[in-house]
Amino acid sequence: MPLHKPWVEFSPQVGARIPGSLGVFEVADAAGATLRVAYAGGRSPFGLRGAIAAAFADPALPQARLFRYEVNSMYITRWKELVRSAEGAPAWTCE
């Protein structure tokens, strides 16, 4: 079951408003094609905020422009669901 939230364009200002919670997220290019499916777990510094910021700072993802996330305390189970539903997107953990 994919995330049903709208894509948001990443910027430092938007990133500062992401909660420091546990959860899952997707990163996409400008066309909305998923590039990465990942999670922020209990060992992720600053939770989703830090994990999403790290994904956009990753030199392996120069085309990353959009993201969406879901706060979820059962993040590994949800991450596995997203990986199965993503079409060819590499799965990453952020712990």
Image: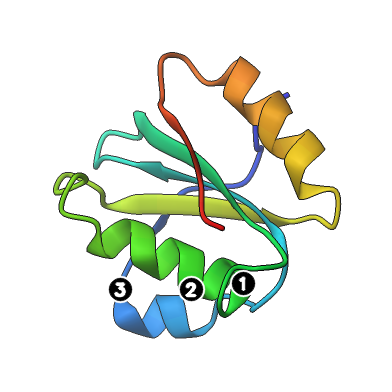
Q: Closer to the camera: disc 3 or disc 2? A: 2
Q: Quick check: marks 2 and 1 in contact, CB under 8 Å?
A: yes
The residue beneath circle 2 is 50
Coloration mode: rainbow
Residue 22's x, y, as percent? 72, 64
Residue 67's x, y, as percent? 44, 52
* Residue visible at 46% across and 85% down in the picture: 16
Label whose residue precedes the other's in the sequence (3 or 1): 3
Quadrant of the frame with the N terminus: top right
Label whose residue precedes the other's in the sequence (3 or 2): 3
> Mark 3 to mark 1: distance in Å?
17 Å
Q: Left or right? Give the position of 33 relative to 18.
A: left
Graded by Cα atoms within 10 Å as few (under 14), some (14 to 19) or many (20 or more), the crowding at tag 1 reads: many
Residue 82's x, y, as percent? 64, 29
**Dividing the picture into quarters, in which one does residue 43 lie?**
bottom right
Q: Is residue 55 above or below residue 90?
A: below
Out of 59 and 32, give the one closest to the viewer: 59
Quadrant of the frame with the C terminus: bottom right
* Residue visible at 41% across and 24% down in the picture: 89
Q: What type is the residue that disc 2 sits on?
A: Gly
The residue beneath circle 1 is 47
Q: What type is the residue that disc 1 sits on?
A: Gly
Q: Quick check: marks 3 and 1 in contact, CB under 8 Å?
A: no
Q: Left or right? Give the position of 2 relative to 90.
A: right
* Residue visible at 35% across and 57% down in the picture: 55
Q: Quick check: marks 3 and 2 in contact, CB under 8 Å?
A: no
The residue beneath circle 3 is 11
Instruction: Label 3, secondary structure: give it.
Output: loop
Residue 91's x, y, as percent? 48, 32
Residue reaching furthest to the right: 74
